[in-house]
Image (spheres, rainbow, N blue to C red):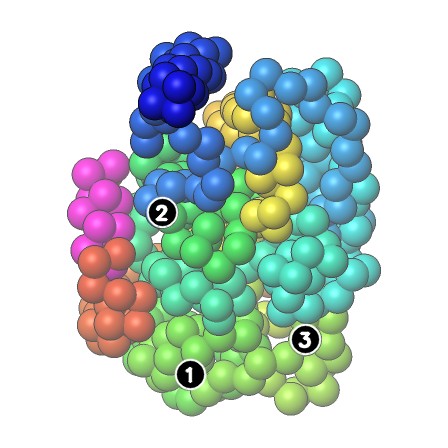
Amino acid sequence: MKKISKAVALILTLALMLTILAACGGGTITQSQAPQTSAPETGAPESSAPSGAAQDPVTLQWAFTPPSGSMDEKWHMHIGDLISEYTSGAVTYEYYPNSTLGNEKVALEGVLSGTITQASISPNVIATVLPEFNILCLPFAFDSLEHFNKVISSDEYYEKMNEVANAVGLQYLGVDLAIPRNISTDKPVYTPADANGEVLRVMDGSIYTDMMALWGFGSSVISYGEVYTALQQGVVDGVENSNDGNLTMKFYEVVDYTTNTYHVYHGQHAVMNLDVWNSLTKETQESIRQAWKDTYPALLEELVPYVQEASDSIAEKGVTIIDLDEEQRQAWIDASQPLYEKYSGVIGEDFYNWFMEFVDSMR
């Protein structure tokens, strides 16, 4: 009887196990069926929102340094309105111009920490945490606004910038405004040979200081809001700037000459906190990306004539404009070559080589 009881118990146990397996689908859980507990180690981070989920309404901060009423603010609002339209009103923006939430360094720290959701920041400042962004400050890398626009509007450029931005907790969105930079002084400058050690106000970041030194200028990093007084009092002899800035900040009242070198197409780059980006649905992320892409053709159409209009406007206000001929422009290019050699290592050889080849392919 004991043997029979043991046999029955064994049969019942096996039957119970088969029933449980059948209820679970009749097999063991494979690796592909197992729930994912973490994101893949490779590839860009993805939205944490469930696929197909509706976007909850969200209002994002957008911090930037140019003043209210500037062309920068105009384009920020244009992009923000387009994003709101593309997301059916789910995403809206609050704008904070004129360094309301702090200067560019403070704004960058805020985006990295998540206390500011989004900010537009100069590449030389972003380069303090991402040296790859120095690439956008290399002089004469682009032939024209059209060339610059072709590069920055491409998907390859967007994806490559996010490869490096995501690594530090940022999502790169796009370029707000690309105004060519020039040199405004109290004396005529046609080539670097005419610099004679004059001191120019430059933006923060070693690349601009090194650039001026190669061209024969001294340099001084001064807050943008204090440049007018510094020029007026002779603290500096000139400013590395744009004609748009000369108009907005009224530098035409305190400089005599502007050399239209157009050496850097300086655009502030909009970056978002990566956790905030990942909290948005995939569809919202795609809408934001599309809105940025759709602004570039209209921006280029407006910027090309505006660059000439800005130059003409400060000429009308008494500034002597120096437009370079090919020989003079080449003198600036030649004087800039050591900067490329130095910063290829700072930027990183792989990224530098990709950028130079990609930019050349877009000419």
Residue at 75% over, 46% down: 61
Q: CA distance from mark 2 to mark 3?
A: 41 Å
User: Residue 282: which quarter of the image?
Assistant: top right
Local SS, label 3:
loop
> Which of the two labelled residues, at mark 1 and mark 2, occupies the earlier sequence position?
2
Q: Read off the residue under disc 3.
A: 223
Indicate the amino acid at tag 1.
Answer: Phe
- Residue 123 vs 232, above or below: the answer is above
Indicate the amino acid at tag 2.
Answer: Glu
- Residue 286 vs 254, above or below: the answer is above
Main secondary structure of the magenta stretch: helix
Q: Choose between 263 and 28: the one closer to the eye.
A: 28
> Which of the two labelled residues, at mark 2 and mark 3, occupies the earlier sequence position?
2
Q: Which residues are magenta?
A: 352-362
Of labels 2 and 3, the one closer to you: 2
Residue 217 placement (x, y as % from top left): 42, 83
Is 4 in the magenta?
no
Residue at 65% over, 87% down: 234
Q: Read off the residue under disc 1.
A: 217
The disc at residue 41 is 2
Q: Quadrant of the N terminus?
A: top left
Q: Choose between 318 and 161: the one closer to the eye.
A: 161
Residue 101 placement (x, y as % from top left): 78, 61
Q: Choose between 358 and 156: the one closer to the eye.
A: 156
Q: Quadrant of the C terminus?
A: top left
Local SS, label 1:
loop
- Residue 27 vs 157, above or below: the answer is above
- Using the rendered image of the protein, determine whether residue 236 is visible from the camera's viewpoint: yes
Q: Residue furthest front?
A: 1
